C-alpha cells in the first residue's frame, strides 16, 4: 500500500507520475526541471513521485523539497515495480495523465509534444525512439535488445507500435482508467518490462488512437529500461 506525503493541489489539468527507485542523487534536480517544463504547459499540474521501496534517501529527499506541486507515494514493493505505478495512476483526477522515467533521458520539449497531442484529442501519445525524426543514443547491446523486443511484440501480438518501452506516455484520463481495469494488480508481479507493452496493446485492441511522438533520447548507464 502507498501513503501520500502531502495534499495534492486542486484543480489539476495534468498529472505527471514519476516511478522512482534509488534516485537520491538526481531526483531533486530532475523534479525541478520537470516542474519547470510542466508549468510552461499549464500552471495547474501535479507531479506524483511513486517510490518503489527505495533503499537510499530518495523518499526523504523528495519530502524535504516541500514543493507545493510535488507529492510522494511510498510503496513497500520494489525495485521498479510497475504494479505500484498502476495503482497510483488509478487515483488520477486530471483530464490528462502522463508518466515519465525519473532519469529524464529524453529532451524535455517532448513532454509538451505528447501533452499537446492528448489535449488535441489523441487518446494516447507516447514518446518513440524509433519514429521518423527520432534520435536515440544507446549502446549497441541495448539497441539490439530493444529492437528484438519490439520486433517480437509486433510479430507475435500484431502490434504496429514502433516503441513500446520509451518512458514517456500520456493518456486521456478516462482511456487510462478503462485500460487499467484490465491490468489487475498482482501480489508478486511478473509482468516486468511487459507492463508498458500490455497497456499499449490492450489500447490497440480496444480501438484507441495512439500517436508516437519522436524523441531525442540518451541512454543512461544505470537505466533499467530497454
Image: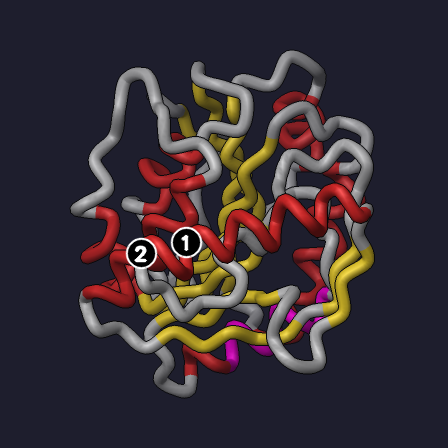
Kindly state the secondary structure of the residue where label 2 is placed: loop
Which quarter of the figure is the N terminus placed in?
top left
Left or right: 144, with 91 as reference point? right
Residue drawn at (32%, 63%), measured in percent from left and top? 158
- Please state the horizontal and vertical placement of residue 159, each as a whole percent of the image: 36, 64
Dot 1 corresponds to which residue? 153
Left or right: 208, with 114 as reference point? left
Res 175 → quadrant: bottom left
Tell me, what colour scheme is on the image? secondary structure
- Disc on res. 157: 2
> Which stretch is magenta?
108-116
Q: Residue furthest bottom?
A: 120
Kindly state the secondary structure of the residue where label 1 is placed: helix
Q: Is residue 179 above or below residue 12?
A: above
- Please state the horizontal and vertical placement of residue 2, each as a whole percent of the image: 38, 24
Q: Is residue 112 magenta?
A: yes
Exactly how many numbered labels are in the figure?
2
Left or right: 206, with 112 as reference point? left
Residue drawn at (60%, 55%), measured in percent from left and top? 147
Residue drawn at (53%, 61%), measured in percent from left and top? 163
- Please state the horizontal and vertical placement of residue 86, each as a whole percent of the image: 35, 40
Disc 2 vs disc 1: Cβ atoms closer than 8 Å? yes
Q: Is residue 159 above or below residue 52?
A: below
Residue 210 visible, this orientation: yes
Q: Is residue 226 magenta?
A: no
Q: Is residue 36 above or below residue 71?
A: below
* Real-space Cα separation, disc 2 to disc 1, in angstroms: 5 Å
Amino acid at each position: 500500500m502507498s501513503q501520500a506525503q502531502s495534499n495534492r493541489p486542486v484543480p489539476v489539468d495534468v498529472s505527471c507520475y514519476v516511478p522512482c527507485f534509488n534516485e537520491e542523487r538526481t531526483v531533486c534536480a530532475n523534479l525541478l526541471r520537470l516542474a519547470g517544463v510542466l508549468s510552461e504547459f499549464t500552471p495547474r499540474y501535479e507531479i506524483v513521485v511513486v517510490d518503489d521501496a527505495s533503499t537510499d534517501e530518495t523518499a526523504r529527499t523528495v519530502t524535504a523539497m516541500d514543493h507545493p506541486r510535488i507529492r510522494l507515494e511510498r510503496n513497500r514493493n520494489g525495485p521498479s515495480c510497475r504494479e505500484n505505478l498502476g495503482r497510483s495512476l488509478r487515483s488520477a483526477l486530471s483530464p490528462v495523465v502522463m508518466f515519465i522515467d525519473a532519469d529524464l533521458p529524453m529532451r524535455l520539449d517532448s513532454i509538451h509534444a505528447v501533452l499537446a497531442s492528448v489535449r488535441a484529442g489523441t487518446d494516447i501519445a507516447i514518446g518513440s525512439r524509433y519514429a521518423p525524426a527520432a534520435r536515440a543514443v544507446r549502446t549497441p547491446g541495448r539497441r539490439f535488445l530493444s529492437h528484438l523486443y519490439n520486433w517480437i511484440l509486433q510479430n507475435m501480438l500484431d502490434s504496429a507500435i514502433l516503441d513500446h518501452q520509451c518512458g514517456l506516455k500520456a493518456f486521456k484520463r478516462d482511456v487510462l482508467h478503462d485500460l487499467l481495469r484490465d491490468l489487475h494488480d498482482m501480489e508478486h508481479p511478473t509482468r516486468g518490462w511487459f507492463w508498458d507493452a500490455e497497456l499499449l496493446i490492450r489500447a490497440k485492441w480496444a480501438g484507441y488512437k495512439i500517436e508516437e511522438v519522436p524523441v531525442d533520447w540518451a541512454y543512461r548507464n544505470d537505466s533499467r529500461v530497454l
